[in-house]
Image (spheres, rainbow, N blue to C red):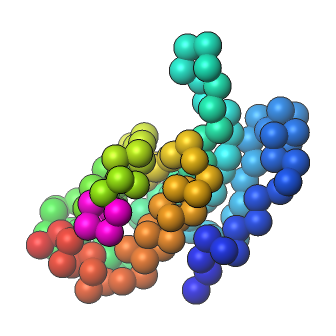
Amino acid sequence: MKTSKDLNIPENLQEIISKEEYWEDDQFFPLNISITYGYDGDKSYTSYQISFEPEDAFEEINNIIRELKGEVSGYEWEVLIRKYLELKDPKLEEYTNGDSEWETCVLWITSEDFFRKLLDHTIEVTINHALAYKLLS
């Protein structure tokens, strides 16, 4: 199982983002990792993002979501991951932003260190069926 330690963010990340507008890493598929700039008024920040389409993977956990919540969506997955964050690292949950849609779960944060924690916790939720059931019950 991969962890955030396997994520090798290039040293010239800012240069890459300036030229390409984003940087991506697909080694955690079906989790998509992307880093880009975000803007809040005049201020810019680096946005570290995890996104995935729940219907494309995680069949067993999707079945749990269907059983307990009715339908699988990016929103339900965001709720699931946030519940885990609240238990494991409430400060991380507070700093985590969501931009999920029906078909896609999107979580992002502006700190690389926090992002690595978010990635590890997200991976934990996606592979642990018993944990998902407990969190959703």
Q: Nearer the viewer, residue 136 or 72?
A: 136
Q: Considering only vertical position in the picture, is 126 above or below 44?
A: below
Q: Quadrant of residue 18?
A: top right
Q: Quadrant of residue 67?
A: bottom left
Residue 87 is situated, as x and y percent measured from the top left of the image, at 26, 67
Q: Which residues are magenta?
A: 84-89
Indicate yes or no whether the magenta region holds residue 66: no
Residue 84 is situated, as x and y percent measured from the top left of the image, at 30, 67
Q: Quadrant of residue 45?
A: top right
Q: Nearer the viewer, residue 93 or 80?
A: 93
Q: Considering only vertical position in the picture, is 91 above or below 28?
A: above
Q: Residue at x 26, y 86 (%)?
A: 130
Q: Residue at x 16, y 63 (%)?
A: 69
Is 11 placed left or right of 21 in the picture? right
| Residue 80 in sight | no
Is 25 placed left or right of 76 in the picture? right
Residue 31 is situated, as x and y percent measured from the top left of the image, at 56, 64
Name the magenta segment's main secondary structure.
Answer: helix
* Quadrant in which the N terminus is drawn: bottom right
Is 120 placed left or right of 78 in the picture? right
* Quadrant in which the C terminus is drawn: bottom left
Residue 131 is situated, as x and y percent measured from the top left of the image, at 27, 80
Q: Considering only vertical position in the picture, is 96 above or below 66?
A: above
Is 69 placed left or right of 57 in the picture? left
